[in-house]
Image: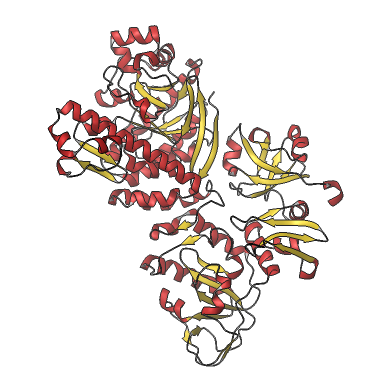
Amino acid sequence: MLDFEIKYKDAMARIGTFKTPHGEVTTPNLMPVVHPGKQTIDVKKFGAEIVITNSYIIFKNEKLKEKALKDGVHELINFPRTIETDSGSFQLSVYGDIDITNEEVIEFQEAIGTDIGTSLDIPTAPYVKREEAEDDLKITIERAKEASKVRKNLLLNSVVQGSTFPDLREYCAKEISKFDADIYPIGAVVPLMEMYRYADLVDAVMYSMRGLPEDKPRHLMGAGHPMVFALAVAMGCDLFDSAAYILYANKDRFMMPDGTLKLENLIEMPCSCKICTEHNVDELKQMPQEQRAKLIAEHNLYISFAEIRRIRQAIVDGELMKLVELRCRSHPFLLDGLRRLQEYKDDMEKLNPSSKKSAFFYTGYESLSRSEVSKHIKKLENITPKSENLVILPHTSKPYSKHVNKEYIKKYTPKIPTFYSNTNNQDFQNSDIVIADIPFGIIPLALDEFYPLAQNESPSIPDENSKKFVRELIQSYTNKYENVLIHRKVIENYDLNGFKLMEKDLILPEAKVSDFIRLKEIADYQFGSGSGEILFGNNPEKITIEKSRKTGKIRHVYENDANIVNMRASDGFLVLSDLGAIRLHKHLKSPKMRVVVSEDSEPYAIKGKSVFNKFVLDCDENIRRNDEVLIVNKDDKLLACGKSLLSSYEIKDFNMGQAIKTRKIKNIEELI
């Protein structure tokens, strides 16, 4: 049984670890294909933690077979760390038949000491007739079931098939998940990549993900070009394998993160890896082909592992989707894949952390489909209008509340044709004030320090798609108000229609938000409508607010010396303290914000000990990584509060690792 533990998250991607008999593997990771009889490159020096080789080739070659059975596959290919073996499915797809059974190949993989073996699935080519795909799928599922019974100590791959029929992919994933394999490869996608059908690749992967458990690694079989790694990782793929590094090298082709370069077209070496700094183009061209291919293959490995490291760092920093967008713009068909991924933004949101380290960078209109944007628009519904009047201002420097007065608003604006309105009402003293900006469209002034509304950057010149997005959002948002006043720059920036120039005197409010109103609005936005009033009441005189001397931002909030909430400096999120947790627990109906723990875990939760996944009985499906949660027992008794380290979907699937970083509620019985 393979234990997989997640360390970091971004989009559907995860940095995780799992152990095998020959060492620990960190994901995402690349498994170089090692030919059992021909390998000339020592992949260990490139940082390979895991490789893949073909058990069927070993089985068919008597010399290799004898050595593997005697000394083990690790000795055979001279690799001391984790080895995965393929079953011969590739040969089956090429030649149509192989002379080994599913049971035999599982037993052989176990006999040669492989760490991770693979059942003999049926790779079904893209775009075949549905009947053929269904027939092949039945065999694949039966063999996955058989393999789970035959294997003893072997860690097992069960491959998702289904051709280019998304529903068959999802069905297969759900069925093979019943047999409790250790890793789930997604198979028969190489032809899609060879044909540059990346949109279809996205469909195949995303529908497979819908049926696969979150607590096991997923392997995108045959994906070996670094230009596709970031997109695949963002969809939840953890492992890649390919012989592309040597196959491309044999054709004098240099792999790069943004495409492929031909030696014949180069006048300079393409990067700063060891190969490119120690050799020049003319040297390579004059070398014997075999020697040249080995050097180019090494370059390809350097580049591939460098891209894996770049992706891991992007996950830690919360910048993976920025990297995905940059990589996908390197090829029009990769851009097709990115745009198809927009159709799965709900799937992405379910696993995307609520808060990240880095700012949101807008790189093009595809950025508008990121989870952060759709989640913000949904959360705007939690904000209840405080008046009948709305004032919409253009963006300024951030935070907006410190700059809009200087640039756009005065208490009294005499006859200056700057604002447009849908009403003749000239008194806008009592108004809600929002900012219109890309990529989040509408930002209430009280939320201008909340992640990612404050932590984002976009071009000052909007593109047509972003104009349309903001325009439509403004038009829907203004339906909440009787009277709307819009600044001229907003009208011009987003081509708004239906508003007339106000040429009369206007009495406008100062664009200022009190700390009390800011707290209440953030609470509503973060926890749900009405939460601000429950936490802080309606009398600001009862609330004591402590601010940072350095930044002037809210840090701690009290009522009668009892701490209600603290504000996290990094993202503006409210962190519940004792009184805040108790009040929200009373206000929010189960299962909202709840993590239900087993009876065995109750005493530890009360003491402030971390909650582990295996002790969670249930949880609110809307919980995301970094969210505040309420820890309760099966009778909904409040035990503690804390920060979620995983999304609800991961918490429910995982049986190991931390779920919640818990905070003890002191004197809980007295406070309740």
- State the colouring used for the structure image: secondary structure
Decide if residue 189 is in sight here.
no
Residue 469 screen position, x and y as percent: 43, 66
Residue 61 screen position, x and y as percent: 28, 11
Relative to the observer, which residue lies in front, 402 or 383? 402
Q: Is residue 396 above or below residue 201?
A: below
Q: Residue furthest right?
A: 670
Q: Quadrant of residue 110?
A: top left
Task: Identify the residue at horizontal 41%, vertical 26% (top origin).
Answer: 50
Residue 186 screen position, x and y as percent: 40, 34
Relative to the observer, which residue lies in front, 63 or 158? 63
Relative to the observer, which residue lies in front, 241 or 304? 304
Query: Seen in the image, is 298 located left or right of residue 230?
Result: left
Query: Seen in the image, is 492 located left or right of residue 4?
Result: left
Residue 589 screen position, x and y as percent: 72, 53
Decide if residue 599 is in sight here.
yes
Q: Is residue 83 above or below residue 202?
A: above
Q: The N terminus is located in which quarter?
A: top right
